Image (cartoon, rainbow, N blue to C red):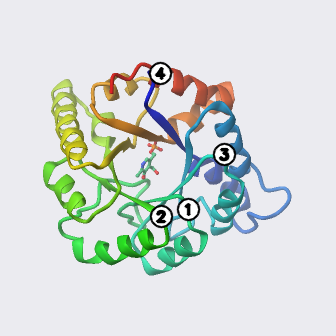
Amino acid sequence: MNGLRLGVNIDHVATLRQARYATMPESKNAEPDPILAASICERAGAAGLVAHLRADRRHIQERDVERLRQSLMTKLNLEMGNTEQIIDIALRIVPDEVCLVPEKREEVTTEGGLDVIAQRKDLEPTIKRLQLAGIRVSLFIDPTLEQVDAAAELGVEMVELHTGKLANAFTEKIQKEELEQLRAAARAASESHLQVNAGHGINYKNIKLIHEIPSLTELNIGHSIISRAMWVGLETAVKEMLAAMKNYPG
Ligand code: PXP
């Protein structure tokens, strides 16, 4: 049975639109439209869509999140930093899920997991407010037992394990160590009754390594799928990733 679900991150569809239409993303000529991309992903078999509303609005805009909320047939996972302005937007739009991530203005993409231990006091009220609004909450964390334990103590529904270091490992030794960390963190999270997701840097090649991580429910993948879509089209790119995720041993 293929139990592994795919959430497609469509930020980079908006990145391309913003490259030309940053000052008028709602113009009738503004393309490509992330909402159209989302519906193609759903048709291809994605279990949900992921969008990161960043403080600098470099790709996804608030209006995109509103439109996704209205049009999705599956589920919307809103990635966001823990800031008052973005929390207000999340509470207004009410996505199905929120994944809290660390966010630095100068980074190209999310660079690592949240430090749940150090930020516990700031995270706790946010998690409560989101959950009270009926939103399931995930914390994007590095794969360490300490971070898993801290996440479990905060009462979130899910963690998303950061796979970026595995994806970018320079040597086989680092890759092996990172995979071991991910395996141990996934086991621990599952034992703490957390839903275990994974994401960042997953592509059509390294996906076979992801199969070695136990207890996963969902993968959130963006850059590789949107890039592949340039050559084969989005529907095929999503279907190819789903095929590569098949037969996950669980
Ligand atoms: N999960 C999280 C928490 C992320 O921040 C990102 C990048 O926005 C992804 C998944 C998707 O990563 P990628 O684009 O490398 O597949």
Number of marks present in the image shown: 4
Judging by the rendered image, the residue that carries numbered circle 4 is: 244
Q: Which residue is mark 3?
A: 38
Q: Disc 4 or 2, which lies upstream in sequence? A: 2
Report the residue at 36% width, 22% height from top: 208
Q: Is residue 247 above or below residue 179?
A: above
Q: Earlier in the sequence, mark 4 or mark 1?
A: 1
Report the residue marked by disc 1: 95
Pair 4/2: label in front: 2
Q: Element under label 1?
A: loop
Q: Residues within 10 Å of mark 1 (few under 14, many from 20)?
A: many
Residue 79 in the image, given as x and y percentages of width and height:
47, 59
- Alpha-carbon span between mark 2 and mark 3: 20 Å
For label 2, the residue is 135
Residue lying at 29% horizontally and 35% vertically, measured from the top left: 215
**Of labels 3 and 1, the one closer to you:** 1
User: Residue 49 at what x, y percent from top left?
Assistant: 57, 47
2 or 3: tag closer to the N-terminus: 3
Report helix, strand or loop for mark 4. helix
Determine contact: label 4, label 2, CB under 8 Å. Answer: no
Q: Kindly report which numbered mark, 2 or 3, lies closer to the viewer in this rendering.
A: 2
Disc 1 or 2, which lies upstream in sequence? Answer: 1
Q: Amino acid at mark 1?
A: Pro
